[in-house]
């Protein structure tokens, strides 16, 4: 009898070893049908506002959550929600905070002096607020737009064909786009000047722009316009600033590196770093350069006249379960903020007569863009198993088969 059991044991081990070599990639196909919920969830977050609050432009409307974009006007602020609606707060004397109905289907926002702009997913622009200079009268055909910008009393729209449409106050030529009006990929509007970023990385400016783009005019990936100065973000993460240097608005603090986004207001400049922190310089008369603590986890930045805004990033965790001689849960943070103190747990149950009952847990930190893998130890058992992995409020369950010491995830 003992000899018979010995041979049976060897046979089972042989089957397990064979499966290890025949199905080495079986676990790699696990979760292939999993889909993330709708929308860019990795960008959902809250808004932080600081600086001048004389019109309540720093009092973010509740609930302060589910925002995916932020923009600032002179004395008002805008936030784009994940559901495509716009929330606006602050000075509403000209109706710049009264979003026209239907308040839905928006994909981008921009704030002007006393007017606001919203880009619809259909490619049309909606504009509201002060219209003294017809800055809210979008030229026909109102279609095919991919980006928007608001100046003091003028507006800009970028068409999908790379041309720019400008309308509103044109006393300084800020609405007269230079020829050739083509090949643009981004727009920015200042008080009395406008900027366009070309696909070749050069910047074109027009209106009252207070100085030429510094040489070499190449390698730019983003632009911003203030009252009397302009900013350009280079592909290497450095910022170039030019124009009137009121209050040091063109003096980028050292180290001038690691930036991923820029914005400007009248005489203040802001840059977003790759580590999620915001650097602000220039006029600080109303505390608009005093970024609240903790200065981290920001995913976007914007500015009004004397106030500043930051969109906080949020972690987004995804779980992938694999098998082998251990059961493993790879937890990936695809969000825009680090995930600290993530509580994880792996449960494995089932097997013949339900003898397999494994639970392991712990706490880990997962920086944004990184993956951390947690595992069980090797365990004995045979039969169908259910594996559940949790990471904070995320949970995933898969089925599998355990063969003595090896798990195959289905």
Image (cartoon, rainbow, N blue to C red):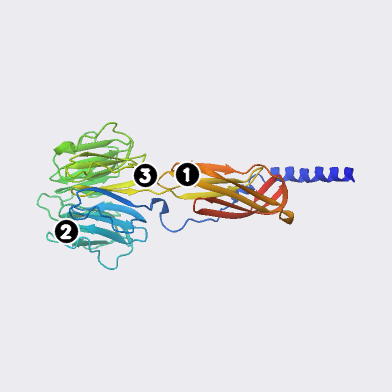
Q: Nearer the viewer, mark 2 or mark 3?
A: 3
Residue shown at 21%/55% (left/top)?
56
Rendered location of residue 353, percent (x, y): 74, 56
Viewed as shown, does residue 309 lie left or right of 329? Answer: left
Q: Is residue 239 above or below residue 129?
A: above
Q: Residue 188 carries which label?
A: none
Q: Is residue 163 above or below residue 367?
A: below
| Secondary structure beneath label 2 | loop
The residue where tag 3 is placed is 297
Alpha carbons under labels 1 and 2: distance apart: 48 Å
Mark 1 or mark 3: which comes first in sequence? Answer: 3
Q: 406 or 338, which is in the foreground?
A: 338
Viewed as shown, does residue 183 lie left or right of 66? Answer: left
| Secondary structure beneath label 1 | strand
Q: 405 or 15, which is in the foreground?
A: 405
Q: Can residue 51 be seen in this view?
A: yes
Mark 2 or mark 3: which comes first in sequence? Answer: 2
Alpha carbons under labels 2 and 3: distance apart: 35 Å
Mark 1 or mark 2: which comes first in sequence? Answer: 2
Q: Are circles 2 and 3 on residues that touch, CB within 8 Å? A: no
Rendered location of residue 107, percent (x, y): 33, 58
Label 1 environment density (alpha carbons within 10 Å; few <14, some 14–19, many ≥20): few
Residue shown at 12%/50% (left/top)?
173
The residue where tag 2 is placed is 135
Rendered location of residue 236, percent (x, y): 33, 35
Residue shown at 13%/40% (left/top)?
210
The residue where tag 1 is placed is 341
């Amino acid at each position: 009898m003992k000899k018979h059991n010995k041979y049976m044991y060897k046979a089972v081990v042989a089957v397990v070893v064979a499966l290890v070599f025949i199905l080495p990639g079986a676990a790699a196909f696990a979760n292939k049908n999993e889909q993330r919920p709708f929308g860019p969830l990795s960008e959902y977050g809250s808004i932080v506002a600081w600086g001048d609050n004389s019109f309540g432009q720093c009092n973010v409307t509740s609930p302060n959550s589910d925002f995916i974009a932020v923009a600032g006007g002179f004395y008002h602020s805008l936030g784009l929600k994940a559901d495509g609606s716009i929330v606006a707060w602050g000075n509403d004397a000209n109706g710049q905070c009264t979003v026209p109905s239907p308040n839905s289907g928006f994909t981008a926002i921009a704030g002007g002096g006393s007017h606001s702009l919203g880009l619809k997913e259909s490619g049309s622009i909606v504009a509201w607020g002060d219209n003294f200079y017809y800055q809210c009268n979008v030229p026909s055909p109102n279609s095919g737009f991919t980006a928007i910008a608001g100046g003091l009393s003028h507006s800009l729209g970028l068409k999908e064909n790379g041309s720019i449409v400008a309308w509103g106050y044109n006393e300084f030529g800020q609405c007269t786009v230079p020829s050739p009006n083509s090949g643009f990929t981004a727009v920015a509007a200042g008080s009395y000047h406008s900027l366009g970023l070309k696909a070749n990385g050069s910047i074109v400016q027009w209106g009252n722009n207070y100085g030429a783009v510094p040489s070499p005019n190449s390698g730019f990936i983003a632009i911003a316009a203030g009252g009397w100065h302009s900013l350009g973000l280079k592909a290497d993460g450095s910022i170039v600033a030019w124009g009137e240097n009121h209050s040091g608005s063109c003096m980028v603090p050292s180290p001038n590196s690691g930036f991923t986004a820029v914005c400007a207001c009248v005489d203040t400049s802001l840059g977003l770093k790759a580590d999620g922190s915001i650097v602000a310089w220039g006029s600080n008369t109303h505390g608009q350069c005093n970024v609240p603590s903790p200065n981290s986890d920001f995913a976007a930045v914007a500015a009004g006249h004397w106030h500043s805004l930051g969109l906080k990033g949020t972690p987004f965790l995804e779980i992938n379960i694999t098998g082998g001689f251990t059961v493993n849960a790879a937890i990936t943070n695809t969000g825009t903020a680090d995930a600290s103190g993530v509580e994880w747990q792996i449960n494995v149950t089932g097997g013949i007569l339900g003898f397999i009952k494994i639970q392991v847990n712990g706490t880990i930190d997962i920086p944004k863009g990184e993956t951390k893998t947690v595992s069980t130890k090797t365990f004995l058992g045979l039969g169908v198993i259910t594996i559940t992995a949790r990471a904070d409020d995320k949970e995933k369950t898969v089925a599998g088969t355990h063969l003595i010491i090896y798990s195959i995830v289905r």
